[in-house]
Image: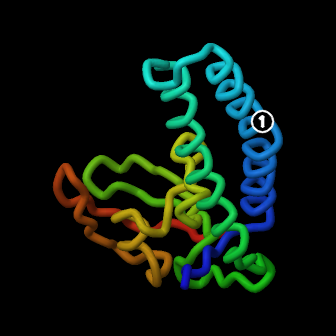
Amino acid sequence: MARASYMTEEGLANLKKELDRLTSVERPAISLQIAEARDKGDLSENAEYDAAKEAQGLLEMKIARLEDMVANARIIDESKIDTSKVQILNRVKLKNTKNNQQVEYMLVSENESDIKHGKISVTTPIAKGLLGKKVGDVVDIQVPSGIMSFEIMEISL
């Protein structure tokens, strides 16, 4: 049994859009490549055919994974999100206690994470260290470079 994937409506829409692109654009393109390679003759020495078949296998695995995620998606009702303590879909403003630099992250599901846009997965060490904490709490979080200490400045949506 696959586990539920919690995500926003936007995250599910993006997932469905990607799945649609893979099935309606990528899949036919690979089928065409295989057909063209097959038409070139002897398949035992046909590197193009082998490469296209391998790409097809990888694409089908990706499609199956996305279909599974869509089938097991659970939409998070953003109107019921509490901001008294850190949880998924909260924006958290943090102050690094060592250098006073401030950062802001939004905690999202693993498949919606996008560090360039400040969205980190709830499975990351920083997010795990923040979950359940309140404004004013100081948390020490083990990261690959050592221990970082953050003060939670603000929790919002």
Q: Which amino acid type corresponds to the residue marked 1 in the rendered image?
A: Pro
Q: Is residue 139 left or right of 142 when viewed as pictured?
A: right
- Quick one: 19 or 40, which is closer to the camera? 40
Residue at the spot 28% in from the left edge and 62% down from the top edge: 149
Residue at the spot 75% in from the left edge and 76% down from the top edge: 75
Quadrant occupied by the N terminus: bottom right
Q: Is residue 10 above or below residue 49?
A: below
Residue at the spot 50% in from the left edge and 27% down from the top edge: 51
Q: Is residue 39 left or right of 114 when viewed as pictured?
A: right
Q: Quadrant of residue 26?
A: top right
Q: Is residue 2 above or below residue 92?
A: below
Q: Position of residue 102 (x, y in %)?
A: 45, 50
Q: Is residue 156 left or right of 105 when viewed as pictured?
A: right
Q: Total marks drawn?
A: 1
Q: Quadrant of residue 64?
A: bottom right
Toward the front, the furthest residue is 42
Toward the top, the furthest residue is 40
- Quick one: 57 or 45, which is closer to the camera? 45
